[in-house]
Image: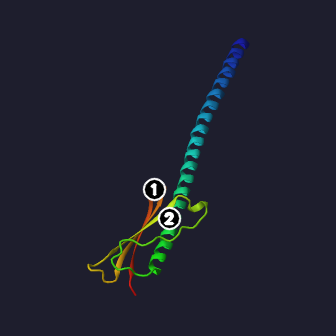
Amino acid sequence: MKMIVLRWLRRLAQRESGIAFMETAIALAILGVVSVSFLSGLTTASRTVIITDEHATAESLAQSQMEWVKSANYSYGATSYAAAPLPGGKDYQQYSATVLASPLHAPDDGLQKITITILRSGKEIFVLEGYKVNR
């Protein structure tokens, strides 16, 4: 009887080492999935921050361009106005602005639609539309 109990205990001990290996493998797989998910989320969040910063910079530039155009002398029949100089610095590198004008009525009665387009590396980032009135 003692031999039977010893065999049974050996089998039980062998089984537990197999279960411990399986538990370790499953835990490592779960840890891997969680790590990949975390890193994917971190990458997405950092890309979102970059896009948001780019959009905010472009919006700020467009607002300053619109104020520049509104403060300039009114030009009857104009199709564009000169853009304001862009600020220097690394935050504004590769940005450019175009300012288009179109009269709302023909002939030009002193009211123009102004369209400001902000580009970064040739890619359109932000468009702002407003009106210029001859006062």
Q: Which residue is mark 2?
A: 58
- Packing grade of label 1 (10 A; few <14, some 14-19, many >=20) is few
Q: Which residue is mark 1?
A: 122
Point 59% across, 61% down: residue: 91
Q: Is 78 located above or below residue 40 in the figure?
A: below
Q: Is 135 located above or below residue 86 in the figure?
A: below
User: Which amino acid, mark 2?
Assistant: Ala
Q: Are marks 2 and 1 in contact (CB under 8 Å)?
A: no
Q: Is 105 located above or below residue 58 in the figure?
A: below
Location of the N terminus by quadrant is: top right
Image location of residue 100, percent across then percent down: 38, 69
Q: Is 1 located above or below residue 128 in the figure?
A: above
User: Which amino acid, mark 1?
Assistant: Gly
- Packing grade of label 2 (10 A; few <14, some 14-19, many >=20) is many
Point 51% across, 57% down: residue: 51
- 37 and 130: which is toward the camera: 130
Q: Quadrant of residue 6?
A: top right
Image location of residue 11, percent across then percent down: 66, 18
Is residue 55 found left or right of 27 in the rendered image? left
Is residue 18 found left or right of 104 in the rendered image? right
Disc 2 to disc 1, how far (Cα)?
13 Å
Image location of residue 130, percent across then percent down: 40, 75
Point 57% across, 53% down: residue: 46
Count the numbered circles shown: 2
Image location of residue 117, percent across then percent down: 43, 65
